[in-house]
Image: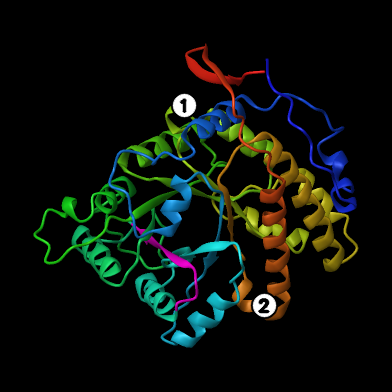
Amino acid sequence: MKARLKAAPRSRARSAVRHEHGPRRHAAPHSASIRWRCHHAMTKAAAIGGSPVAIGSRLRRALDAGRSVITAELAVPATVAHKLILERAKGLLRPQIVAMNITDGLRGRPALSPIAAAAILTHADLGVEPIVQVVARSRARNALIADLLGASALGVRNLLCMTGDVPESSGDIDDVDVFTLIELARGFPAGLGTELLGTAEPFCVGAAWSPFAPDPAHEAERLVRKHAAGAVFVQTQPMFDAHGFAAAIDRLPVSLTELPIIIGLAPIRSCDHAQRLGAIPGIVIPDRLLALLDRASDEADACERYWAYLDAELDWLTRNVPHRGFHLMPIGHSKRGIRQSSSFDRLYAAATRALDAAPPNLAEVAAPVEVSGRVFRTSAV
């Protein structure tokens, strides 16, 4: 028998968009929810994977302890002004944000080295760890190894390994793919194939996942390979459809149940903004959200409609699909100043409310059940 999850009370804002998913039902959680949540109940205090643990990474220790986390994304521009980097980072600081992604050539455009930006943050001692994004595209193997050495020497402990956006200039170098990059980072320093002077700690290595990619099976297979290569956590593209995300989780193989998934969230300020976001590869805006925003009288009304919608989505997601926290992506934050800072506050508040309302992991687990060649775990009663 499946356990019935107790529903968290809704606010007025949430009830405003309740009809978007239809009447509320106390339905059994998704099969993926059951097997993922039960697995975490059994492995909450266990280390993830069999690779050396990055002791110096507070993010890794939090994930190993089974805690949910909130991370944020700092878009690094083409600049040499370290004060600008600090100003943008300080604008994203919030009590529950434990780490900050440093982008690497966002949209394939030239920018300050993320390793240099991470060093600026580390030296400033802001209380958050940098997660340096490292992209395989247009990088030679020796250049990537040099980046890993430099990151380690400057105190970086967390990496997010990605394929990377297509650069604006031509001349891609296909020396290393993302799977080899993850293997290099996870095997660091022993797996570099060169003698290292000095000692270095292992990295906490993450990977990216696009739950709404056009070919879900191919994307799931890529995630399996990334996990096998050594990724110990995953961050996703922004999620705007909780039911679609649950379906993507259902498609993942059982071998990934131990992989912590941190869900991407982003603000939306208008229907036009939503359509532009939907043009970004890996981001899908559901029709019901576009219709909701299209009925707004102005931008302020559209924003309120979106926040109510997001609260309802996260409420359903938290009760039905297990995850390990949220990755906040304040797209356009640096360009819109105070206005966008308020938007980031709302995004952060939505994430913290969802984590606070999350039900505890199911404590009792029944024997695994195999259905059509896949193994599921149902909760005991």
Determine which residue is flagged by label 1.
254
Q: How is the image coloured?
A: rainbow
Residue closest to the eye, 324 or 82: 324
Determine which residue is flagged by label 2.
336
Name the quarter where the C terminus is drawn.
top right
Residue, x 87% and y 32% (percent of image)?
23
Which amino acid is tagged 2?
Arg
Counting residues from the start of the chain, the first of labels 2 and 1 encountered is: 1
Q: Is residue 198 visible?
A: yes
Residue closest to the eye, 290 or 1: 1
* Residue 104 image offset from top left, x and y in percent: 41, 66
Residue closest to the eye, 201 or 191: 201
- In this rendering, the label closer to the viewer, 2 or 1: 1
Q: Considering the numbered disc 1 on the image, is that residue within a helix, a strand or a loop?
A: helix
Vertically, is 242 above or below 328? above
Vertically, is 123 above or below 99? below
Q: Are marks 2 and 1 in contact (CB under 8 Å)?
A: no
Image quadrant in which you'd find residue 165: bottom left
Image quadrant in which you'd find residue 54: bottom left
Q: Is residue 37 magenta?
A: no
Which region of the structure is painted magenta?
125-135
Q: CA distance from mark 2 to mark 1?
A: 42 Å
Characterize the magenta stretch by its predominant secondary structure. strand
| 30 relative to 272 in the view: left or right | left
* Residue 60 image offset from top left, x and y in percent: 42, 52
Which amino acid is tagged 1?
Val
* Residue 3 image offset from top left, x and y in percent: 70, 23
Crowding near pointer 1: few (<14 within 10 Å), some, many (20+)?
some
